[in-house]
Amino acid sequence: MEKKLNIALLVVAVAFGQNGVCARSYVKTQLQHDAAVAGITSLVAAVIAGDYSKTKALCDGGTDINERRDKYTALMHSIRQGNLQITTLLNERKATINNDDIQKVIVESVDSPQRDACVKAVLDVNPGLVIKTGMGETNQQSSTEAVLARHKGQ
């Protein structure tokens, strides 16, 4: 109900002559409010919702893409969601991830081809990341698919 009300308010704002900048400002403010209520950043809220447009708008607006309020960054959430489009966007914007974070995402998320594609995309742009598997440490020099397969076999 609240989301429908928020959308209705945005439509009213636009209908009464608010320009695009004001409308975008309203949407950003509403995202910030909704995220604050949930205890997460606006960017993470957009990523979890799978909303590429809002994610891109927040990145374009200067949002700190590496901020975390819970144990995950926006990039970690996009990997967990298996959203390759958003993961690619965050990679292009230079989102950072470390060995512990990529390991946490792999261990704590559901195995899926989409998740694996996101992990591969992150490993491709972060060659220094090391994934620990039951067979020891494996770095980017090994096939990403083999790393993920070994992890699944644990």
Image (cartoon, grey):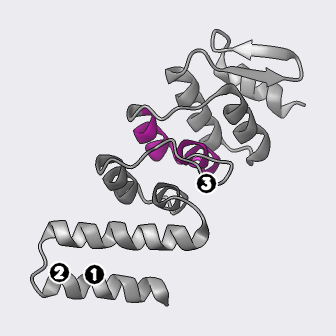
Going from the N terminus, do you reach mark 1 or mark 3 first?
A: 1
Residue 104 position by quadrant: top right
Q: Nearer the viewer, residue 68 or 89?
A: 68
Mark 2 — residue?
14
Q: Describe residue 117's horizontal placement relative to residue 147 as left or right.
A: left
Q: Nearer the viewer, residue 110 or 43?
A: 43
In this picture, is 13 found above or below 131?
A: below
Q: Are marks 2 and 1 in contact (CB under 8 Å)?
A: yes
Mark 3 — residue?
69
How far apart marks 2 and 3 lie (CA) works out to 32 Å
Which percent across, then down, holds residue 147? 74, 22
Q: Describe residue 8's horizontal placement relative to residue 108 as left or right.
A: left
Q: Describe residue 17's horizontal placement relative to residue 6 as left or right.
A: left
Q: Which disc, if any, is residue 10?
A: 1
* Residue at x 73%, y 47% (from the top left corner): 109
**Residue segment shown in magenta:** 74-91
Q: How many marks?
A: 3
Could you classify mark 3 by the number of other residues whose Cα lies within 10 Å: few (under 14), some (14-19), or many (20 or more)?
Answer: few
How far apart marks 1 and 3 lie (CA) works out to 27 Å
